[in-house]
Image (tube, rainbow, N blue to C red):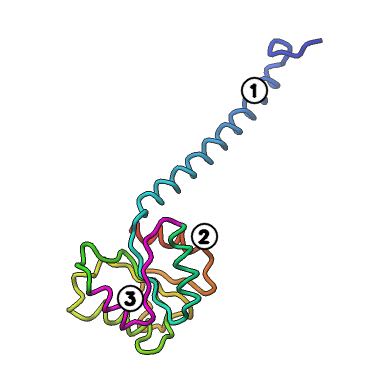
Amino acid sequence: MENNSTDLTNEEYLERNKKAIAEYNKKAEETVNFLKKECSRAKNAKARLLLVDDERTIRDSYSLGLRELGYEAYLAENGQEALEKIFSYPAESGFNAVLVDNHMPVMSGEDFVKNIRQNPKYNDYSDMKVISIGHPPSEEVRPMYDAFLKKPLELDEMDSTLEKVLLE
């Protein structure tokens, strides 16, 4: 005997429709989440990032990951070099965010963020986001950062943090 909708009781028909609707809603939610992520990535595409770390292998590997995610990644070895690079661009066309290690020679990440946030010379750069990477910053400078990432950095976590921070 063929089983079609006329052979179903009302309860069976309703249950079958509930399952179909639930499956449709799940697929729709997956599609919406995918589109949100792609739209966010498109908004962040060509965001200019400065990665500051004294370890060359870290700079090279993380910058490669950032480029794969669609960001423009620039590099600096320490906070002093980062300030020089930032100041070499007009604020409106400069870096959208800086990912900075806290422990480096010449100028630490903490000294860097103090300069960016407190030195009147850098007032035009106040919209630039600063993300701490590595060891947690001291209580004194913690409020000056926009986000924190622990090493080793996971690409997905770095991407979601950047998306969140850049959309603020």
What kind of residue is marked 1?
Leu
x%, y% of residue 59?
A: 45, 74
Kindly report which numbered mark, 2 or 3, lies closer to the viewer in this rendering: 2
Count of marks placed on residues:
3
Mark 2 or mark 1, which has the lower sequence index?
Answer: 1
Residue placed under numbered mark 2 in the picture: 156
Q: Measuring 48% from the left and 63% from the top, which residue is drawn there?
A: 65
Q: Measuring 26% from the left and 77% from the top, which residue is drawn there?
A: 117
Reply above or below: 22 against 134. Answer: above
x%, y% of residue 151?
A: 52, 74
**Image quadrant occupied by the C terminus:** bottom left
Few, some or many residues within 10 Å of mark 2 (<14, 14–19, 20+): few
The answer to whether marks 3 and 1 mark residues whose Cβ atoms lie closer than 8 Å is no
Few, some or many residues within 10 Å of mark 3 (<14, 14–19, 20+): some
Taking the image as shown, residue 80 lies to the left or right of residue 119, namely: right
In the rendered structure, does residue 109 fall within the stretch colored magenta?
no
Residue placed under numbered mark 1 in the picture: 14
